[in-house]
Image (cartoon, helix red, strand yellow):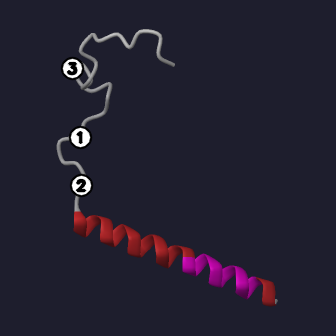
Amino acid sequence: MKSWSVLAGFALLLVAVFGVSYAVGRQVGPVAPGLRPSGGVGGVSPGAGGHDMGGMR
């Protein structure tokens, strides 16, 4: 019986932490407003201007 209360308390704590982090993230807004995925719509990703890095690994 005690293990269920510990498990329920842990689950409640997780929900609370994620809820607070979500609320803070919504208030702060996007970190980089102009950020687009690298495979974005109809464009070349930034920094891919045809420069070869040679033999770098």
- Residue pointed to by mark 2: 30
Q: Which mark is residue 35?
A: 1
Residue kind at label 1, given as amino acid type = Leu
Q: Is residue 15 above or below residue 25?
A: below
Q: Which mark is residue 43?
A: 3
Question: Which corner quadrant of the image does residue 23 belong to?
Answer: bottom left
Q: Position of residue 33 (x, y in %)?
A: 18, 48
Residue kind at label 2, given as amino acid type = Pro
The residue that appears at 27% across and 10% down in the rendered structure is 50
* Among numbered discs 3 and 1, the one appearing first in the sequence: 1
* Among numbered discs 2 and 3, the one appearing first in the sequence: 2
CB contact under 8 Å: marks 1 and 2? yes
Q: Position of residue 51 (x, y in %)?
A: 29, 12
Front position in the image: 20 or 8 = 20
Say what secondary structure mark 1 lies in.
loop
* Among numbered discs 1 and 2, the one appearing first in the sequence: 2
Task: Report crowding for label 1: few under 14, some 14 to 19, many 20 or more residues within 10 A (C-alpha).
Answer: few
The residue that appears at 30% across and 33% down in the rendered structure is 37
From the viewer's perspective, is 9 left or right of 30? Answer: right
The kind of secondary structure the magenta stretch mainly shows is helix
Say what secondary structure mark 2 lies in.
loop
The CA distance from mark 3 to mark 1 is 13 Å
From the viewer's perspective, is 8 left or right of 57? Answer: right
Front position in the image: 3 or 30 = 30
Residues shaded magenta: 4-13
On-image quarter of the N terminus: bottom right
Residue kind at label 3, given as amino acid type = Gly
Q: Residue furthest front?
A: 55
The CA distance from mark 1 to mark 2 is 9 Å
CB contact under 8 Å: marks 2 and 3? no
